[in-house]
Image (spheres, rainbow, N blue to C red):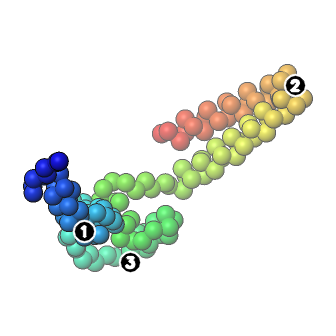
Amino acid sequence: MFFVPQNGLLSLLTSQKMENTDPKAAKPKGGRPKKTEEDKRSKAIQVRLRPASYQYIQTLAEARNTSMANVIRDLCNGDVTVITPEQEALLRQIATMANNLNQLARKAHSEGFALAEKMVWRRCQELDELLYLYSK
């Protein structure tokens, strides 16, 4: 004959079952984690701008496909890079020349390297000059 005390294994198992009857207690909480105080945007300012400054921020926002508020935040953080028209023209030329080099490389692989060597060197020199101008 076996003797099982009242506070034995059976009572331990039944008490554990009774504690976990709430289905919500077993599920982890979902959703986005809470932001820290440092990450929260809790301060607001109102700024009056001249029409030219307003247009400048609006143009940056349209070019970056974002809101004007995001542009101003990025400006405050130093994250906005402004490209001058001269730099934009140089970048266009560099992209064109890089495309030409790619075409020359394909031509060299199909027709032989000796024919394309002079053209490749000429394009590389032009590209070096443009990169030097852009870095100023």
Which SS class for mark 1? loop
Looking at the image, tell me whether mark 1 or mark 3 is earlier in sequence order: 1
Q: Quadrant of residue 18?
A: bottom left
Name the mark nearer the viewer: 3 or 2.
Answer: 2
Which SS class for mark 2? loop
Q: Residue at x 31, y 64 (%)?
A: 27
Q: Residue at x 30, y 56 (%)?
A: 77
Which SS class for mark 3? helix
CB-based contact (under 8 Å), mark 3 and mark 2: no
Asked whether, in this view, residue 33 is left or right of residue 85, the answer is left
Q: In the orientation shown, which residue stands out farthest toward the top?
A: 114
Q: Quadrant of residue 28?
A: bottom left
Q: Position of residue 107 (x, y in %)?
A: 84, 34
Residue that numbered label 3 is attached to: 51
Looking at the image, tell me whether mark 1 or mark 2 is earlier in sequence order: 1
Within-10-Å neighbours for mark 2: few <14, some 14–19, many 20+:
few
Residue that numbered label 2 is attached to: 112
Q: Position of residue 24 (x, y in %)?
A: 28, 70
Within-10-Å neighbours for mark 3: few <14, some 14–19, many 20+:
few
Name the mark nearer the viewer: 1 or 2.
Answer: 1
Nearer-the-camera pick, 106 or 4: 4
Instruction: Tell me the amino acid under the disc marked 1.
Output: Thr
Asked whether, in this view, residue 124 is left or right of residue 51, the answer is right
Instruction: Tell me the amino acid under the disc marked 3.
Output: Pro
Q: CA distance from mark 1 to mark 3?
A: 64 Å
Q: Is residue 37 something one can see in this rendering?
A: no
Residue that numbered label 1 is attached to: 21
Residue 112 to residue 75: above or below: above
